[in-house]
Image: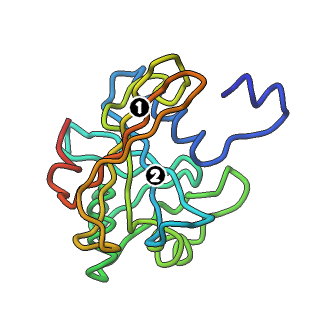
Amino acid sequence: MIQACKDTIRGLNCRGLAITLNECYLAMGFKSRYVTCMPRELEFEDCHVINMVYSNELKKWIYLDPTNNAYIMDEKGTLLSIEEVRQRMIDKKQLILNPDANWNNLEATIPDFYLTFYMAKNLYRIQCPISSEYNFETDAPNKTVEYIELLPLNALNRVPSKKEFSKGETNSKFINYNTNDPIRFWAKP
């Protein structure tokens, strides 16, 4: 990705930033995943990709957003997981965005817009790789890429399922599993 950015003189979108941060955390020995946060609609033009990193000290996954240099806390200053942020949004409990959060180091992230509109919209369906590893999305012959997507119970009349397709040129296989089970989805590493 770094070479592609140099070659085309451009930056990375949220997915590229989250994948890069994920691989940095993995290289440092942290348990980490990039997470695609999607709206309720099956067809959409905007979603957001962030990270979750496991904290041994807190014994939970922590919410991190590399695009906005953001993390989220409760009223006591405790770092929250994506699961906790999502539930606190549903319960209308206080969320605190770090004060130095900013979009691509260019402009301050506005907490009200970010939390009550943008992420509230994008935390309906959540997808991540089943196995977080280096070069997960790099195309390679006969590679299998598996994702798991967490859906709210009875979301869009979808039930737990498995969807599979292949890429002709490389014979790569892509598998997406859906689940309504948050305990399994947010399991500790």
Q: List the residue tagged with mark 1.
A: 145
Q: Which mark is residue 37?
A: none
Which residue is depicted at the point 30% across and 67% down?
Answer: 158
The amino acid on which the numbered mark 2 sits, given as a three-letter code, is Thr
Among numbered discs 2 and 1, the one appearing first in the sequence: 2
Work out which residue is located at the far front of the displayed protein and give it: 168
**Quarter-wise, where is residue 126 in the image?**
bottom left
**Quarter-wise, where is residue 182 in the image?**
bottom left
The answer to whether residue 82 is left or right of residue 112 is left
Which residue is depicted at the point 36% across and 36% down?
Answer: 146
Work out which residue is located at the far bottom of the displayed protein and give it: 92
**Quarter-wise, where is residue 138 in the image?**
top right
Which residue is depicted at the point 27% across and 69% down?
Answer: 152
Distance (Cα) linking label 2 and label 1: 15 Å
| Label 2 crowd bin: few (<14), some (14–19), many (20+), radius 10 Å | many
Q: List the residue tagged with mark 2.
A: 36
Question: Is 83 placed above or below 11 here?
Answer: below
Question: Is 20 placed above or below 109 here?
Answer: above
The amino acid on which the numbered mark 1 sits, given as a three-letter code, is Val
Residue 13 pos. (x, y %): 66, 47
Q: Secondary structure at mark 1?
A: strand
In front of the other: 100 or 22: 22
In front of the other: 179 or 87: 179
**How was the colour assigned to the protein in this rendering?**
rainbow
